[in-house]
Amino acid sequence: MINLKEKDYVVIVQCDIVKQRCPGYLCEKAFNERTGGFASYPKDKAYRKINLTCGGCCGRAIHRKLTNLARVIKKREGIEKNSIVVQLSSCITKDNYHAPPCPHLDYIKGLIAKIGLDVCEDTVISDKAQQRRQAGLYADNKE
Ligand code: SF4
Ligand code: SF4
């Protein structure tokens, strides 16, 4: 169980393909309101936050991006890996109107684990998508 109270730095990773169109506003809103995948984050704690994309299929670039980020913030500010949490956006983790979940989800999670960073899943959870999952229109993978 990841203790989000002990984290200081949130890295939201979004699907590179989806981000060609999506500004990521609903991810930001969910974080700001501590809803969806952010519901377990304490509301009274201010987090540093950065958004990245996976870098494109097959997601391999996320290893380089996160390795570089962890190295730089440790060097510049002394922030350790255990203060960082990676949050995979719902367009990676969930079946929704954009597309099915990322076919490389397990691979990406493995890359992040290899760096030694904690990873959580989901960002925005839309009521409509949830209803469609319950109706069997979308795969109810984890939401
Ligand atoms: S989860 Fe939604 S808002 Fe966030 S990046 Fe993906 S498509 Fe955009
Ligand atoms: S690897 Fe997955 S998350 Fe990244 S661009 Fe491809 S489908 Fe999107």
Image: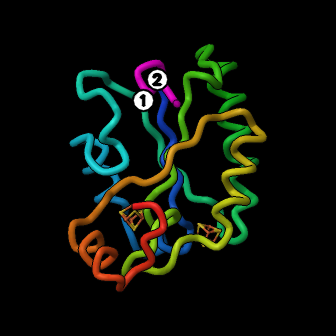
Amino acid type indicated by mark 1: Arg
Residue 125 higher or lower than 134, as above or below: above
Helix, strand or loop status at disc 2: loop
Q: Where is residue 93 in the image (x, y as percent from the top left)?
A: 51, 63
Helix, strand or loop status at disc 1: strand
Q: Name the residue under label 1.
A: 48
Q: Earlier in the sequence, mark 1 or mark 2?
A: 2
Please name the residue shown 26% across and 46% down the image. Answer: 35
- The region drawn magenta spans 1-8
Q: Position of residue 30 (x, y in %)?
A: 28, 49
Q: In this view, does 26 lie to the left or right of 63?
A: left
Please name the residue shown 29% across and 59% down the image. Answer: 26
Amino acid type indicated by mark 2: Asp
* In magenta segment, residue 7: yes
- Judged by its main secondary structure, the magenta piece is loop
Q: Nearer the viewer, residue 71 or 122?
A: 122
Q: Which mark is residue 8?
A: 2
Q: Position of residue 90 (x, y in %)?
A: 43, 61
Q: Distance between the residues labelled 1 and 2?
A: 6 Å
Please name the residue shown 24% across and 22% down the image. Answer: 44
* Residue contact between numbered discs 1 and 2, judged by CB atoms under 8 Å: yes
Numbered disc total: 2
